[in-house]
Image (cartoon, grey):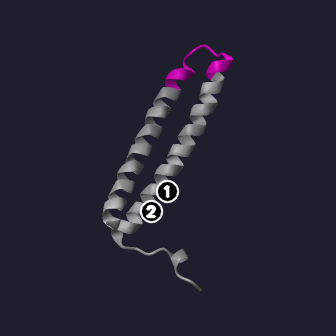
Amino acid sequence: MNKFFSVLQLLLAVLAAGLAVATLVNLVLISSRPETISVVNAIIGQGLLIVCLAAFARILGRKAWRTLSGETSDRSQPD
C-alpha cells in the first residue's frame, strides 16, 4: 500500500511541476501585454504560484522517491 501511495505522490509531483511550467509560460505571455495594475498583480500572483508549485513538487517528489527506494529518513529514528 505504501508503494501505491508513493507512486501517486510521484505522479502528483510531476503534475505540480507541469503546472508550474505551464504557469511560467502563461507568465511570459502576460508580460508582453501593456503594463497596467491588473497585469502587475497577475505577474506577482503567478510568480508566487510558480514558487509554491515548485516547492510542493519537490517535497512530494523527494518523499515519494525515498519511499520507493526504501530509504529511511534520519528524523524518524530517536537519538
In percent of width and height, residue 44 lies at 63, 31
Q: Residue 59's mark?
A: 1
In the image, residue 5 above or below residue 26? below
The correct choice, above or below, for 69 with respect to 53 in the image is below
Which element type, helix, strand or loop, lies under badge 2?
helix
For the C terminus, the quadrant is bottom right
Residue at 52 percent across and 77 percent down: it is: 76
Image location of residue 18, percent across then percent down: 40, 40
Q: Dot 2, how many residues are within 10 Å of its Cα: few (below 14), some (14-19), or many (20+)?
A: some
Residue at image position (35%, 54%) is 8
Magenta stretch: includes residue 18: no
- The residue identified by callout 2 is 63
Disc 1 on helix, strand or loop? Answer: helix
> Residue 54 vs residue 41: left or right?
left
Q: CA distance from mark 2 to mark 1?
A: 6 Å
> What segment is highlighted magenta in the picture?
28-39
Q: Relative to 66, is 44 above or below?
A: above
Residue drawn at (41%, 50%), measured in percent from left and top? 13
User: Which residue is outermost to the top?
Assistant: 34
Q: Which residue type carries mark 1?
A: Ile
Q: Residue furthest front?
A: 1
In the rendered image, the residue lying farthest to the bottom is 79
Which residue shows up at 39% across the image and 44% down it? 15
23 relative to 79 in the view: left or right: left
Which x, y percent locates residue 59? 49, 56
User: What type is the residue that disc 2 sits on?
Assistant: Lys
Is label 2 in contact with label 1 (beta carbons under 8 Å)?
yes
